[in-house]
Image: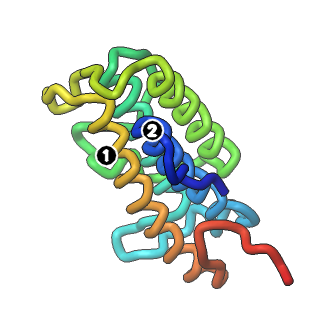
């Protein structure tokens, strides 16, 4: 598991913090079958795979769209605010994990190419810096990784933010 450097610069530290939580998101899907990953675990319908889909979509949105980069079609709908959290028939762990991987790679490219002070326009029209987007996505990803930890524990008892060494 990646550690946030104790003496890293700001951008390096923010990226490492984001990567740490991104890795947890994928780890929470490890070893699950399709039914377990898509099973609604709360009255609102939250599932592990739905949270992963949501995080992929918001990564693309906050990093790529905000800074004028292209994305693949994203599962957002003005008529259906939960569309990005719902797993549709035919969507799989492999497909959603790949979507998350592509979003992460696109985001990483933006992070690498821009400075923390560079600005873009958020989906709601506000001007935001890359610094703000990084902080927001660390918060967003950590929040949902925590949700995923609880859902995974309810599914099969697995807890934590990384694989623990035996012995």
Callout in the foreground (1, 2):
2
Q: Give me the disc on residue 155.
A: none
Q: In the rendered view, how is the structure colored?
A: rainbow
Question: How far is the residue under mark 1 from the one under mark 2?
Answer: 18 Å
Tag count in the figure? 2
Left or right relative to 44: residue 98: right
Which residue: 65% across, 49% down? 92
Of 16 and 100, which appears nearest the observer? Answer: 16
Q: Give me the disc on residue 9.
A: 2
Vertical order, 33 against 42 (above or below) = above
Q: In which quadrant of the rendered view does residue 132 lie? A: top left
Vertical order, 133 against 42 (above or below) = above
Left or right relative to 6: residue 125: left
Are the residues tagged 1 and 2 within 8 Å (C-beta)?
Answer: no
Left or right relative to 10: residue 36: right
Of 103 and 127, which appears nearest the observer? Answer: 127
Q: Give me the disc on residue 136.
A: 1
Q: Position of residue 159 (x, y in %)?
A: 61, 78
Which residue: 43% across, 66% down? 46
The image quadrant where one finds the C terminus is bottom right
Q: Is residue 53 visible?
A: no
Which residue: 40% across, 16% down? 69
Q: Residue furthest right?
A: 167
Q: Residue furthest front?
A: 7
Which residue: 34% across, 15% down? 68
């Amino acid at each position: 598991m990646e550690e946030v450097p104790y003496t890293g610069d700001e951008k390096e530290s923010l990226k490492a913090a984001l990567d740490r939580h991104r890795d947890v998101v994928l780890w929470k899907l490890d070893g699950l079958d399709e039914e377990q990953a898509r099973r609604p675990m709360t009255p609102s319908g939250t599932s592990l795979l739905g949270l992963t889909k949501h995080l992929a979509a918001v990564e693309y949105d906050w990093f790529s769209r905000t800074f004028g980069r292209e994305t693949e079609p994203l599962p957002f709908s003005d008529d259906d605010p939960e569309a990005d959290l719902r797993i549709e028939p035919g969507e799989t762990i492999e497909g959603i994990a790949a979507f998350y991987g592509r979003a992460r790679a696109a985001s990483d490219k933006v992070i690498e190419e821009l400075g923390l002070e560079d600005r873009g326009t958020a989906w709601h029209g506000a001007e935001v810096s890359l610094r703000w987007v990084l902080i927001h996505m660390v918060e967003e990803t950590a929040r949902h990784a925590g949700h995923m930890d609880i859902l995974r524990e309810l599914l099969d008892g697995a807890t934590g933010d990384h694989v623990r060494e035996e012995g």
